[in-house]
Each structure stands twice: as structure tokens, then as C-alpha cells.
Amino acid sequence: MFKKDLFKKILKYFLISTPFLGIAAIVVYFSTSWKQLPLISASGSSAIFPLITEYSNIYDESDIVVQAGGSGVGISAALNNTKNFGMASKNPKGLDGDKKQEWIDKRMKTITIAWDGIGIVYKSSSNNDTLNITSNNILKIYQAFAGYESISFNDLDSNNSSKETIKTYAREGGSEKSGTADAFYKDSRLKPSSGILSEVEKKALETGSYGKNTIPTAEANSQAWSSIKDSLDKNTMIYLSAGFILNNKKEILDNGFKIATYNGVELSKDKIANSYNWYRPFNLIVSLKNIDDATKKFINWTITESATRDQILDNLGYIKLDASDTNKVNDWSKSDADLGYCGA
């Protein structure tokens, strides 16, 4: 199989040493040894983007072109067949009406290839700036990120004496567009001990129509973090991918931020989906009516046991599938609707 970097080295050698003969030699080599690779295109979740990019660098049976843009973009790309697969760091829940029927008719399939956690990073003006997320304060945390209520760290955790209003940073477009925002809002697995969100607050978290105390950020974790890290506000808070937090922990702490605990459990990769129970899936979405063999082969490759791919997941701070997860996605004869999955 022809490699682009090898071609460049050969081309450089011949053009330097024998410029006229070299061109002819390259043409002969190129025409006899080069093999056209299938092209696979993908778009969607900015959290999944670096994982698929790393995979594409070592996968040698197709050329993979991947773009970020948010989980909503990935779901639409798969449904509208503008890409070979879509990337979504959330499940396509709550389908209704024409959209649900289209999901059924096009035999859409959601394939989980890894898991990631959600963490909250914060900076408080108090010296005793703890923040422990529980069912007792999760509602106020959602209210803080909606941006319409003046919420302080003291409201969230009595061990924190700061009573100034928290400035929160949340993804533009809310949970409808961002998989990270969706997981933050819907996958905490904490039931508020009392109270409910107002309709305005629900809409803010769902659509990104935040109040004055919340600053919208771009979807990518790196861009969201950049928005808050240089802020002059003394009381700030943001939700980020656990993989991003763990891979950038030193920078986060060096900038004066702390990482919230979840029911007293510190964020760490080995505790996600265990005692630290705030996590979300990394999904690839395809239409079984339109999927080609190259795309199916690549997706199968992403969920096959491999020390190299396990190392990539580990380096990015993500969690690999266990055997039961793998068994669920290997059946290409069944769509989401066949399985009663993802609201279809």
C-alpha cells in the first residue's frame, strides 16, 4: 500500500540527485505501486474529534476526513447522509414526529465506541473553596449555569464562604447542539433533593438562551477552557470533558482552578462509570440503508481489542468498552428502532 510520506521522500531524493530521470521514475513508481484508498467522511462532536483523528492516523485501509462542529451537527450529518458517519457524544434522545419516522425509515444505528466523564472546574475567591456535587446542590448548579439566578459557592457548598455571584461558562446552543452540554444537563444521575427548574431555566440549558450570569463558549473543550482560564472574575465555573480535565490537570491547577468532587469522589479515569457516576457515550451514527463496506470495516476496527487503540484512549483520558458494550454494537442487522434504542 502506497504511503504519502514515502512518496515525498522518494520524490525529494530523485529531484535532488537526478532531476530529469527522477520525474519519470516517480511517475512509474506512482502508477504501479499507488493504490486508491476508500474515502470516509465524518463530522460532529468536538469531544470525539481528537479520538477519531488519532485513529485515522494509524488506520491504513481508508482515508478518513473528520470535522468537528458539535453532536447536533453529527446527528444531522448521519441522518441526512452528508457524511459516512456522524459523531455524537450523546444519545439521540427524544425523537418525535417526522424526525422519529425518518430515523426509523433510514434504519439509523448508534454505535458506542468509548465512554467519557463530565467534570466541573471552578475558581472561588474563598480560601476554603471546596465544591462537592450532590443531589442537594445539583439543582442550584443547573440554575447557576442557566444564568438567571444569582448563585454563590456558599449556596452550593456551606464549606465555601464566598457569597459573590458565580459567573458560569456554558456551551452555546445548549444541550440541543452540544454533547458535552447534554451530558452535563441530563446525565449527572443525581436526582435533586427538592425543587424544580423553571421553564426559562430549562430552555436556557436546552437551547443556550442563557441569562446574564452565564457566558456562552464554543463547543470544543479547548476553546471553552480558553474562555474561562484568563477571566478576571474571581468566582467562575465551567463543565468540561473528564478526558480534557485529566489531560490538562496541571494547567488547570496552575491557573488557580480546582476540580469539583462528585458525592465526595475525586474525578479519575478508573472511577468514571463506577463511583464517579457522571459520564456519557462516544457514539458513531450511521444509516444501515446507506453505509458502505469501508465505513463498516472502520467502525468494527474501532471496537476491536487492540493495545494500540487502548493506549490512544488512555492518552486522551477516555474509557474503553467492556465486552458487554462490544457485543451490543456488533450486530449490523439491527437498527436503533429494531433494538428499541435511542428513542427510535
Image (cartoon, helix red, strand yellow):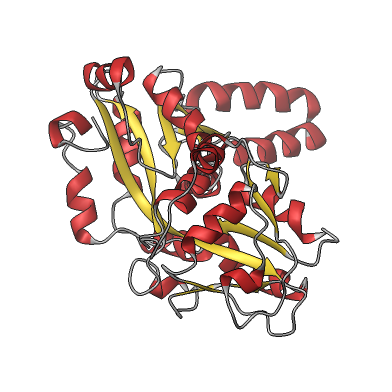
Q: Position of residue 162 (x, y in %)?
A: 72, 75
Would you say 311 lies left or right of 148 here?
left
Q: Vertically, is 127 above or below 52?
A: below
Residue at 41% x, 59% y is: 188
Residue at 66% x, 74% y is: 258
Q: Position of residue 241 (x, y in %)?
A: 54, 57
Q: Vertically, is 162 above or below 32?
A: below
Name the quarter where the C terminus is drawn.
Answer: top left
Would you say 340 lies left or right of 307 here?
left
Residue 27, picture quadrant: top right
Residue at 33% x, 36% y is: 93
| 2 or 214: nearer the viewer | 214
| 205 or 297: nearer the viewer | 205
State whether residue 241 appears in this view. Answer: no
Residue at 64% x, 58% y is: 238
Q: Vertically, is 298 above or below 232?
A: above
